[in-house]
Amino acid sequence: MARPSFAARSTLASSSYSLLFFTSSLKVTRGESQVEILSEKFTIDYNNLRLVLSTKNSIRALRIYEKMKNMYEKVSIGQRREHTIVSIPFKVIARNDEVRSAIHKVLCSKLRKVRNERTRMKIIHALMRLSSSKEVDCEP
């Protein structure tokens, strides 16, 4: 296979540089799947139908676990690599109307943004588990 000429290589390099510059200038939205419970931000895990807080500080995780354990009875804590994970299942959260409406709002905004059909179905399933009816009521 022949090696490309110097001009072709410099053109490829400049186009890949511009692509790299373009992708690095894109705005990354962080925290769009988060819900605040008792002044702690939990991420919505719609794959496993739970709220998750992951931290490297195990002492902080234990404090959060104790605080959530007093409020909700089925809170779990676990270790994954160097992170400590505190999780609360959806069925425990469904009793609190304020938190349930906040999760519903976040999942509806995720449903509007997602393009993948498989992810879309997982979000719809999570919305149906969260609501009492069998319909998903996200206004456009």
Image (spheres, rainbow, N blue to C red):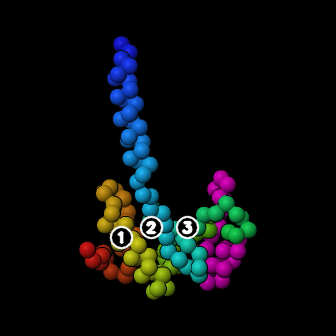
Residue type of the residue flagged with mark 1:
Ser
- Give me the residue at 42% from left, 44% from top: 21
Residue type of the residue flagged with mark 3:
Val
Contact (CB < 8 A) between labels 1 and 2?
Answer: yes
The relative height of residue 65 versus residue 97 in the rendered view (above or below) is above
Give residue 119's position: percent from left, percent from top: 36, 59
Contact (CB < 8 A) between labels 1 and 3?
Answer: no
Q: CA distance from mark 2 to mark 3?
A: 14 Å
Whether residue 136 can be seen here: yes
How busy is the neighbourhood of tag 3: few (under 14 within 10 Å), some, or many (20 plus)?
many
The relative height of residue 70 versus residue 119 in the rendered view (above or below) is below
How busy is the neighbourhood of tag 1: few (under 14 within 10 Å), some, or many (20 plus)?
some
Q: In the displayed structure, does residue 3 sit left or right of residue 91?
A: left
Residue labelled with disc 1:
109
Residue type of the residue flagged with mark 2:
Glu
Whether residue 44 can be seen here: no
Q: CA distance from mark 1 to mark 3?
A: 19 Å
Instruction: Pick the residue in front: 131 or 137.
Output: 137
Residue labelled with disc 3:
52
Q: CA distance from mark 1 to mark 2?
A: 9 Å
Question: Which region shows up in magenta?
Answer: 62-84
Marked residue nearer the N-terminal end (2 or 3): 2
Give residue 58's position: percent from left, percent from top: 71, 64
Q: In the displayed structure, does residue 35 sit left or right of residue 115?
A: right
- Give me the residue at 66% from left, 74% from top: 64
